[in-house]
Structures are given as C-alpha cells and as structure tokens.
Image (cartoon, rainbow, N blue to C red):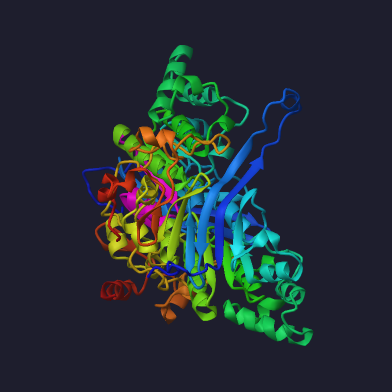
Amino acid sequence: MTLGEKPGDVPLLSVEEVVKRFPMPQSILGRIAGRPRLAVNALNGVNLSVHRGETVGIVGESGCGKSTLARCLVRLLDPDDGRVRFEGRDIGELAGAERRAFNRRVQMIFQDPYSSLNPRMTVRQILGEALSVHKMRPRRHISARIAELLDLVRLPQDAAGRYPHEFSGGQRQRIGIARALCVEPDVLVADELVSALDVSVQAQVVNLLLQLQEELSLTVVFVAHDLRLVRHISHRVAVMYLGKVIEIGPTEALFSAPRHPYTKALLDAAPELDPGRRSRQAAARGELPSPLDLPQGCLFNSRCPFSFERCFAERPLLGERGRGHRAACHLSEFGTPTFVASVKAPA
Amino acid sequence: MSAVTDTAFEPALSVKDLTTVFETPGGPVTAVDAVSFDVMPGEVLGLVGESGSGKSVTLRSLMRLVHAPGKVAGTVLWQGRDLLSMRERELRRVRGGKIAIIFQEPTTALNPVLTVRVQIEENLRAHTSLDGRQRRARAIELLDLVGIPAAERRLGDFPHQFSGGMKQRVMIAIALASNPRLLLADEPTTALDVTIQDQILKLILDLRDEFSMSVVFVTHDLGVVAQTCDRMAVMYAGRIVESGSVTEVFSEPHHPYTRGLLGSVPRGGAERTLLTSIEGTPPSLAAIPAGCAFHPRCDFAVERCIERRPALEAIAPGRMVACFRQADVAAEAAAT
C-alpha cells in the first residue's frame, strides 16, 4: 500500500527544499583576516511529504540531518531556506492563534527520557501543564483526563503523583508519549523514541506506538537510526545522507530493492539476525565527509563503489524509480543497476 | 563441566563460579553471580544481555579491573594459572599483554593529551623488547593493520583528530600491540554508526583469523552476536541463563528470556505487527527477585520458579539452560 501517493492529494505536512546551516564559531584572528565563516550544512535542500494517517520513517547515520529535520517539522528550528507546510500553509508564517493551533496539532517526543522531563514536576503536573496551556479541558476535568491518559499509555494510576526519577526508562518514554498525546495532536514526530531503551523494553514502546496510532488515527514521523525498527513501523521510508534525502519509497520496495548504493550499503551493514547468513565483506568503505565542506557532485561519491565521472560533476536529483519510489543516483536512472542483484532478500 | 567438551582442545580461558559483590550502604549487591564459561582457542564468545545484566562487570572482574567496594571470587584459569589469585606483578604481564581489552567509548578510553604514537608505544614498551626505532615501525604497522589510511602521517595525531570509528581502530591497534591471545571487547561498536560498526566487526574477525586469537564479545545487540560470534551466553540479573552455539540458540531458544529477547527485535516480513515483547523491566541488582530472577516477567512461570532458583544445566552437548520449564519453552517455540 502506498499511502498518500495518490496524485492531487494535499499532504498533511510537506517539506520543500529546506536548507539549514549552523555557523561555526570563528576566531577573532579569522574574523580580522576576513576569512569566510564556516557552517555545518545540516540540511541541503530536503523534500518530503507526509500524508494523513501514514507513518514515515526517516533513517540515516549520525550527522545526516534527521534530527534537524525533525526539529524543523515542529518549528523548533526555522529553516534558512525553503519551507515547511502544514495543511498547505507555510508554518513559518503562522502567528497568534494559528501558531498555537499548529503547536498543539504537531507534537514531538524526544529521544532522551531522562533529560526531557522536568525532574521537579510530578507526572500530574507535567501532563496538567500541557492540558491547561492549550485549554484542552475545564479545570475540574483535568484529573479525569490525566487518568485517561495514563490508561492510554498503560501506566498505573498511582503514577500521577510520582516524579520522573521514580520511573524506568521505558516508563518515562510512556510519560513523554502521554505528554505529547494530551493535547490531541494530529501528528507525532518521534526522534529516536526507543534508542535509549533496552531491547525488551523497546518492543513494548514500539507496540504501544503502533496501537495508539490505530486507536487515535495519528500521523507519525519516526526518526531513527535503527533500520530494523524503521522497517517495522513505517509505511514509507526516507533515507538521508549528508543533509539530503537520497532515497524514498514504500517500505517493502525500498528494503527489497534499494535503488541507491548508500541505501544498499546501509542495509548490508545492519547485522542480520540470522547466524546462518553471514558476510565477511564490509558493506561500505570510508566515512562520512565533513558537513563543513560538501563534496562536489553526488554527496556519496567518495564512498560509492560505482561512482563514475558524472557523479563528481553533477549532483543527481531525486528521480522516479517506481511507484512512489525515488532515488538520487545517476546510475539507477538507466534501469536496474547491478548493485540491486546482490541485496539480501527479506528474512 | 565445560560447555564445549571437545577433549582435543584445552580452553584458552576457563572461568568458574565468578562472583562479584559490591558492598553498598544499602547492603551487598551481587552484580555477577556464579558465572562459569570456557573460551576455546580461536573462538568468539558473545556475552549478551541488557543493561544491568552483569555482562560488562563479568569482563572487568576476570581482568581484576573491579576495585573496592567490589569483591571478586571464583577462579579464572589462563594457561593453567588463576588470574584472580595471581600476584599483581605477574598479572600486569598478562593484562594488556596476552589478554587485551577494548572498551565501548574510544573517546574516554584514549588519553586526550597524548599522541596516538605515544599510546601505542607505551604498550609496546611494556610488553615487548623492541627498541625505539622498531617500536615506531611497529606502531605504523599496527595502524596500517587496523585500516587507518596514511598511517605514518597520522602517528603524531591526537585522539581528537580522529573520527569515532578511527578512534576505535586506534584502540584496537593498541590492544594488538602486545600480540594478545585473547581479546576482551566490551561493546566495542555500540557508539558507532552502522556502516562503521560493520567495518570494525569485520576487522575484529579478520584479526581473529590472522592471529588465531580468542575473543570475548560483550554486547546487547543480537544482530552483532548473530554476525560475529561462534558461541553465546545470555545473561540476566548477573547469571548466565542460557548458552550454546549461536546457530542453536537462535534457532531453538530454551529459556523464555532468550526467546523474548529474540522476539523483541523486529525481523523483516511482518511489518507493523505487534512484537513479542517481554513485560516489565530488568530488575535492579539490589532487588533481584527470589527464585528464578526472571519469574515476574515470565509467561511460563509456575510456583516452583518463585520458590527455587533453577541451576544452569546441560540439555545437550554444549547447550546449557537454567529453566525448570525449558522443554515446554522449546516445544512452544517449535510450534509457532
């Protein structure tokens, strides 16, 4: 099912050519000498659309810009160029009541369940604050709503009176989810929701997210570095590299027949759970180039085993490679490239 | 009662009843509880578990890196000698020499104010009889071996000039300087990205083949175990609950915890379905449940599991499980 790939359908959230740079601190000497100020190129023209009811996974290694993108989606960061639209409206232009409505309808859950909850507030205060700021319920109904929310995220009722330090990591992440859900949002942006948790607890939180999404018909943007998790949760997946989406497509198509050599390397590098299937060849050579100084041409050219002249001269565009499947690679422009053949079949 | 009973080989390392207790104001905390395992020459053994399972403390205990208020008991036999009762001076020749260790965080494990050259040569000076010129040549050789480009030029660089993956390679180069027979690796790739992790894992396997080292690999990542280890031991609340060859444990888990752990990791093919999670959280080591430590989270628990602790028993050659209901667990796993 390629949710949200019907033509003419207005996406709930869309990212258009978003650019984000973080200037580096510069020494006084450098400033006097008039040297150009360096900047980390975190996002270099990202395009993405998210449709109502679907889960879009954003995957990539550290430094690929996935967290910056998540922050731009909820307007914790303003892009330097390009725009993010919510229901067709540029979120950078929203003000007053409209801005507040946007803030309520698009919620973020953070990675670290230890630093994202105020240690001096009880769970009741944490949830109550969000409820009263957005005037979600009359004061006298707040307690009942908190009880409902705790049920929703499968926490015991006595949790309301306790402080964050009294909970385990998994339980804290449930509190984070409850806090995001208490304002009845349309979109959840989850940045590395479970990566700080133990494997057995990860599964509980992932199950909870899947159930809540069905129950509340939420739209989810799931940002993570764990390919197995992203594959499990997402309808569609976008792969990022050096601040660009280099491949995007329906989960099954992307995982079974990746059309970008970096996606393939990422899939091959993820250690497979089957001890019977081992490879002794490293999947990718080299390391991420510096985001201070982007390579000419294709961003992956220095590590790509297939790069040829054109890859160093011209940056490939994200082009159609199948139904809703797009890749930014010169090679896959002409039919099926050779690297697809050696991809592992889904287990 | 070694796990692998091939009489033709003596184990490189034999750990028996290793127990580590920390005295705390709240009473003694048993981090490692009567852990026994053997590592055969050239074998990669995986110690798997979640946080607080005691896997890292096990590794540190057998190298006597646990300090007060921690107390280590048991025996760790290395070439017929007990590392735990050895004199400090003798131990120093083995530790970092024939037994090397690499840690999870290369950034904190390397000294930030010394060049890579000084840190490699330090180990060469301690464990080899090479002279200054030979040490430098060997340091270049080692950096080259672990895949650091332009090794000679990088020798004078400081740790901060290397990326995370390159720092871990430097750590491995330091560990290899003394030609170890056994490499202890404590989550060596957890801090790294997946393509870099893949490179480091393959490097460790290549080095194992080249120098026929044994490796003990501590990790929480089942994928890493599946791809790199020959045998595995699953730890829970300070004890080994199941061990055996990686192929057998993955295809036929006999302990409900192992089974739950394997079910918790999504596999391709069943997208957007619920995972078989384990309810609850791993226990705190200060409050380990009576009986089987896993019983509050276990679907198979019966009265016996609450009253008594199951011993780790052999169920087949090279396969050990600590569960009263292991046969039922395996039968149900086979049925689904």
- Taking the magenta stretch, the answer to whether it contains residue B216 is yes
Residue A101 lies left or right of residue B224; in this view the side is right
Left or right? Give the position of A217 relative to A142.
Answer: left
In which quadrant of the rendered image does the N terminus of chain A lie? bottom left
Q: Residue furthest right?
A: A139
Q: Is residue A156 above or below residue B160?
A: below
Name the residue at 41% across, 48% down. Answer: A328
- Residue A233, quarter of the rendered image: bottom left
> Above or below — where is B201 with respect to B266?
above
Q: Position of residue A13 (x, y in %)?
A: 56, 65
Occupied quadrant, residue B114: top right
Q: Residue at x 55, y 68 (%)?
A: A12
* Residue A227 lies in the magenta-colored region: no
- Check the image and name the residue furthest to the left: B8
Q: Residue at x 67, y 53 (%)?
A: A78
Q: Nearer the viewer, residue B256 or B289?
A: B256
Q: Please tell me whether residue A326 is drawn above or below residue B310 in the rendered image.
A: above
Horizontal side of A160 relative to B157 (left or right) equals right
Q: Position of residue A114 (x, y in %)?
A: 65, 60
- Asked if residue A138 shows in the view, the reply is yes
In percent of width and height, residue A226 lies at: 46, 56
Q: Quadrant of the C terminus of chain A?
A: bottom left
Question: In the depicted view, which residue is nearer to us: A142 or A51?
Answer: A51
Residue B290 visible, this orientation: no
- Residue A165: horizontal and vertical position, in percent? 68, 65
Numbered marks: total: 0
Q: Which residues are magenta?
A: B212-233
